[in-house]
Amino acid sequence: MQFFTPWIKSLRSNVGYPTLKSAKARSVGYPTFMRGRMNALDAWSNRAHLNKVGADVIAIANQKGGEGKTTTSINLAHGLSLAGKRTLLVDMDPQGNSSGIFTDIDSLTKTVADLFTKKYTAQEIIVSTRYEKLDILPAKISLAEVELSTLNVDAPYVMRDALESVKDKYDAVVIDCPPSLSIFTINALGSAGFVVIPLQAEKFSIDGIKGLQGTIEGIKRRINPELKILGALITQLKSNTVLTKTILPVIQNYFPVFNTSISTGVAVGESHLSRRSLLDYNSGVKQAKEYMAFVKEVLDGIKK
Ligand SMILES: Nc1ncnc2c1ncn2[C@@H]1O[C@H](COP(=O)(O)OP(=O)(O)OP(=O)(O)O)[C@@H](O)[C@H]1O
Ligand SMILES: [Mg+2]
């Protein structure tokens, strides 16, 4: 990682080694959007105050597909580890895209699905990656099969409990969410201290923004009062277009927006094909530099 040294040094100067912090004890109800699905969900409200939420747990969420969640998760997680933080990347998406970058998905015998079925503990499932200080709690398609069978009273808190059990081993956790408001996204937002929302500056991307804001507010009210919106990250930006100028103010009406945005570039897809983070694949390309600037903004944001 020699090419990264100056950047790492500048980051390390403002990075401590915080541990996961506690949430205030509060009792909240179950999410409005799940009402009516199961009477057992009434009992969710009784669990909300029992667990602690990690302040340095960052969920990367947007229920719309293809907005850059996985690309952002991979590079944020790697960037935080390069900055000296012991980092855990959690894949909450049955597509297993971020797991495929760091592991051989086909040979995985333990995945995040086993947390929901209580077959293995987080510690037993976590695997190390080729990058120092970066581990992954991987997922694959089997995660999709557990959802219906696990909607019991503990369902929204599986990830929170899992992260509690490994909190002493990590300074930061990044959770890659699926493109849906499933029990997995609820788990991610329920255990996170912060949420980052990647989205494109496109009409279809902002069409769902009000719903997304409502979802996050619902989670804050009902499950995780500690959740803070760190910001929206504009991804796949085609620079200086009228669209950008028009759409940015709309996004700012709903969420704070990171100063950094991520431009479109072929190196992103290439890094995925080579199963490396972009920061590793080619730290000199524009998008890698943008992701580095984004990591710095995140570090500043979670310190506040
Ligand atoms: N900055 C970028 N430049 C070029 N291509 C990008 C960029 N960011 C993401 N992509 C591409 O866009 C596609 C979607 O990105 P990604 O998988 O990160 O989004 P996602 O929100 O995780 O998708 P999903 O909702 O399916 O999980 C991928 O093919 C990825 O390679
Ligand atoms: Mg994804």
Image (cartoon, rainbow, N blue to C red):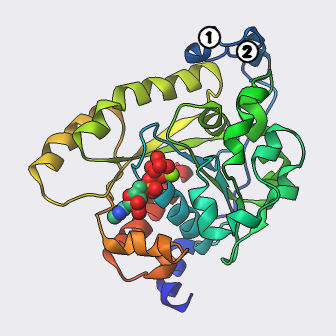
Q: Do the residues labelled 2 and 1 touch (CB within 8 Å)?
A: yes
> Which residue extends farthest left?
242
Q: What residue type is labelled 1?
A: Arg
Q: Nearer the viewer, residue 28 or 302?
A: 28
Regarding residue 60, the answer to whether it shows in the image is yes
Q: Which amino acid does label 2 sit on?
A: Leu
Label at residue 17: none
Q: Position of residue 130 (x, y in %)?
A: 68, 78
Number of numbered discs present? 2
Residue at the disc numbered 1 = 35
**Dot 2: within a 10 Å radius of its alpha carbon, few (fewer than 14), some, or many (20 or more) residues?**
many
Does 203 sit left or right of 159 as displayed? Answer: left
Q: Which residue is drawn at 71% across and 38% down?
A: 145
Does 231 sit left or right of 77 as displayed? Answer: left
For ligand 1, give the image quadrant: bottom left
Q: Residue at x 64, y 50 (%)?
A: 56
Regarding residue 86, the answer to whether it shows in the image is no
> Which residue extends farthest bottom?
2
Does 220 sit left or right of 167 as displayed? Answer: left
- Depicted 216 relative to depicted 42: above or below: below
- For the residue with label 1, is its CB less than 8 Å from the closest atom of ligand 1? no
Residue at the disc numbered 2 = 41
State the quadrant of the N terminus. bottom right
Q: Earlier in the sequence, mark 2 or mark 1?
A: 1
What is the distance, in whole Å, between disc 2 and disc 1 at their CAs?
Answer: 8 Å
- Depicted 108 relative to depicted 9: above or below: above
Quadrant of res 39: top right
For the residue labelled by badge 1, is the local secondary structure a helix, a strand or a loop? loop
